[in-house]
Image (cartoon, grey):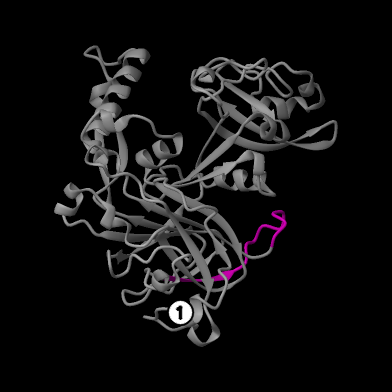
Amino acid sequence: MSLFTAEASQCCWTLLVLSGRHFVSVAGEGPSALRKWRLRKLLELERWMVNSSYEALTGGSSIEGFEDFTGGIAESYDLNKAPPFLFNIMRKALKLGSLLGCSIDISSSYETEAITRQKLVKGHAYSITAAQQVLHFGSPVELLRIRNPWGQVEWTGAWSDNSKEWDGVQPEEKKKLDHSAEDGEFWMSFPDFLRQFSRLDICNLTPDTLTSDEVGRWSYSEFDGVWRVGSTAGGCRNYPATFCSNPQFFIRLEDVDDDPHDGEDGCTALIGLMQKDARRERRFGRDLNTIGFAIYQVPDEYKGRSNIHLGPDVLLRRTAVARSQNFINLREVCDRFKLPPGEYAVIPSTFEPHRKEASSSECSRRNRRTAVRWRRMLTLTSQSRTSDRTTWTRTSNVSLFRFVET
C-alpha cells in the first residue's frame, strides 16, 4: 500500500509516495493507533520538507489540506449565503468522487472545539460522506451523512441515530442507510445543516487521484502563460491603463447542463485562480497577493479566432458577465458559474498592478516572475478539442478551469 500526496511547489504538483511498509509492525500487522500515529508523523514530515520549516506549517485551512494532498481544485461556500440548489451540487460532487467538508465558525479562540448543546463541535472539520433523499411518511426529505473524524461525539438533533424521525422511514431504507451505527457518522436534514454549520468546502479531484470505477471522473488539459512585472501584470479593472495587459484565456461553452432539477439553464463552469503558497517566503517578508478574475463575453467579430488579445476597445467598454466574488489574499480563489453557451475570455489578475515589485529582496534576487497554469477538467462523457497553438476549447456539462501563479 502506498499513500500519495501532492503539493503545489515551484509551479507544478509534486507527487510524494510514502511506502506502506511504514505502517506495519515487525509482527506483520501494526496496531491501528500506532499506524495512525506513524501516518500523522509521515504527513507532518512531508509538509515540513515541502515548506522548508515547521514555522511555515502554522495556520491554514481544511481547504488547503484538501488541495495539498490531492492536487484537486476546491470551492468554498458561506452557508449563510447558500446558493439555490446547493443540495444538488453536493450530491453531484459526491457522485464524482469529490471530497466534502464542513465546519462551524468560531468568534474567538476560546470557542475552539467547544461542544454545542446538540453535540456539534465548533471550529472543527467534519467530512460529508453521502447525500440522500428519503421518504418520511411519504414526503421526500433531503439528508446528509456527516462524519466527525474523532469517531465519536455525534449530532443529537433531528435525524440523529435514535431520533423519532426514523420511525417514518421504511425499514429496508433505514437498513440501507445504516443510520444507527456508533462510529462518529450521523444523518442530518439539509435545512438543519444550513442552520447549524457555517462553511462548506468541496474539493473536486483529478483523474490520477481517483481509484474507484464506481465514481465519475474528470479529464483535463493544461495551458501555460505568464504575468510579467511591468509588462503583463496589469491589476484589476480598477486600473484601466494596465488591466488589458493581463493574460487572457479563452473558453467555449457549448452544451447546456443535462440536469433538469438544478433550476437553471446554461453551462456550469468552476473557475479557480491559485497562487503559489508563500508560507516558506514569510521569513523573507513575502505573503500572499490579493487575487481574483473577471469573465468577459467574446464579441462576435472575434469568435472562433485564435491567438487574439482583447484590447481596451472591448474590455473597457463592456461589463464583465461574471467575476470572482472577491479579490482576496487566499492561496486560491474559486467560484462556480452558470453561463449561457458561448465564447468567453477569462482574465486572472492581482488586485493592484505590478505587485511583484513589492517582493522582498530575497525574492527579487531569485528573479521571480509570475507564471500562470490553466487546468481544464470536464466529465468523461464530454468531448474536448485542444491545440498546441490555441487556447480555444470545447467543453460540455460541468467544466473546471484552474490558473496557477508562481
Residue picked out by circle 1: 312
Amino acid type assigned to the residue bearing label 1 in the image: Pro
Residue extending farthest to the bottom is: 301
Residue at the spot 62% in from the left edge and 69% down from the top edge: 340
In the structure shown, which secondary structural element does the residue marked by tag 1 occupy? helix
Q: Residues within 10 Å of mark 1 (few under 14, many from 20)?
A: some
Q: Quadrant of the N terminus?
A: top left
Where in the figure is residue 10, as x and y percent of width and height?
A: 23, 50
Residue at the spot 65% in from the left edge and 44% down from the top edge: 82
Corner quadrant of residue 17? top left
Where in the figure is residue 120, as x and y percent of width and height?
A: 61, 20
Left or right of 177? Residue 287 is left
- Tell me which segment is drawn in magenta: 249-264
- Taking the magenta stretch, the answer to whether it contains residue 263 is yes
Residue at the spot 38% in from the left edge and 68% down from the top edge: 246
Say which of 7 and 211 sits in front: 7
